[in-house]
Image: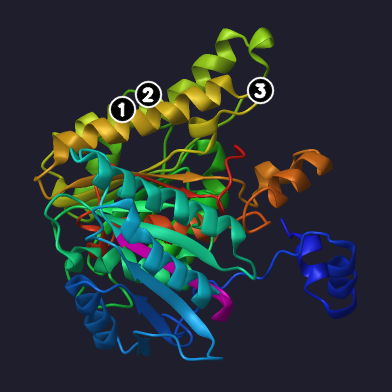
Amino acid sequence: MTDNYLNLVNSGPAGNLAKRLGLPRPAVLRRHSPGAPLVPGPLLVLGSSAAADTLATLLLEWNQDVRRHARPGERLGAIVVVLESVTDPGQLAAPILELGQALRQLARGGRIVTVSRPAVGCTNPAEAAARQGIDGIVRSIGRELRAGATANGILLGSDAPVQAASGALRFLLSGKSAFVDGQFITVSATEPAEAQNEDRPLTGQTAVVTGAARGIGAEIAAVLSRDGATVVVVDVPAAGEQLAKVANRVGGTALQLDITADDATTRILDHVQHRHGSLDLLVHNAGITRDKLLANMDAARWESVLAVNLASQLRVNEALLASDVFAGSGRIVCLASTSGIAGNRGQSNYAASKAGVIGMVRSTGLALEGSGRTINAVAPGFIETEMTAKMPFATREVARRLSSLQQGGLPGDVAETIAFLASPAAAGINGEVLRVCGQSLVGA
């Protein structure tokens, strides 16, 4: 669905009027475009540690125009703040205040990315306080930025070298992360693998996408195909005609089945093995809503949502991880929701299912540590889909404007994040839940 208000306030006269009236003025976001530079304009690296020098060198190798100090009047495409060696809250003042001055020079659609260590597991109280303080700083900056700029952080896991951040850093600097804001990505000591083809990092891989007949699922299939994957699209028989169109569009194959059926996993694995030999990526996108206030909730609404959104994923994952068809470096990406994090009125069943997905991902991630396989979740917020188009007008407008980016996301924003988590660049990311919500906790 088109956000007519966004288009209106980005036109001359209406935009000026909105400014005078103090109305929200959401910006057109910098999204991925083939051939576009990773960062349009100079990139500033702040930090005095050796790790900051290492990242600056890495960015130079990516052909970025790197600065170690801002030049007066120069528009910056991105600012990377390296804080991995901070051990006391007092050490935050100098780099963060320097960042504050540089923010005045940040270009439209700019990116702020911090690189630090997680507070969880830190036994030194002062060091833990400093690390957690970075969390508050990044999320606050995300609320202050305008013109489509975003602020996110990378957390280097125990003993992880700064180079391990490179895959997440490239994603967060790029247009592919347009609707990811105020978020943190934790990476392990595993350094990202180099893709044989940077433009098509999934070349030679086979992916299965459930719920792929329309909306976010269809967009996921398209982006994975763009990145080189051979895609098997799955949906219920009732959506067969639309599913076939998606399969034709992405050059893949269609498999009609109900993901809640007892033989669903067997049919998926047999199809993949017969056509492609092995499975590299499974995207659990299939999901339904049956909204009702809990006082009016019946068993059918509750059980159907839990069956599709959660129980089917648990069952499929168990069989998949035990199968030789699933590759040794296989990826599983699950669709959660901000409803599963913050809850949402009339969605106790849906929120339970999506919170359950988050719990499943974190637990399975622990079991997969060191195996070469990963599982992660993407939690969308308000996304412009057929489902959100049916919301009452006032509710829809409020949901759009309550994010830091003052607009809803697009299905492609979710798809780009999933494609990143599926790629070799995300080898060190496991058991994580990444929100794609423009820094909002309005459920969708």
Q: Residue 201 falls in which quadrant of the image?
A: bottom left
Residue 302 screen position, x and y as percent: 54, 15
The secondary structure type at the circle numbered 1 is helix
Graded by Cα atoms within 10 Å as few (under 14), some (14 to 19) or many (20 or more), the crowding at tag 2 reads some
Graded by Cα atoms within 10 Å as few (under 14), some (14 to 19) or many (20 or more), the crowding at tag 1 reads some
From which residue to which does the magenta span run? 104-115
Q: Nearer the viewer, residue 73 or 300?
A: 73
- Which numbered circle lies on residue 311? 2
- Which numbered circle lies on residue 314? 1
Q: Residue at x 27, y 81 (%)?
A: 56
The kind of residue on which mark 2 rests is Ala
Q: Contact (CB < 8 A) between labels 2 and 3?
A: no
The kind of residue on which mark 3 rests is Gly
Does the stretch in magenta take in 47? no
Residues at marks 1 and 3, CA–CA distance in whole angstroms: 24 Å
Residue 147 screen position, x and y as percent: 64, 71
The secondary structure type at the circle numbered 3 is loop
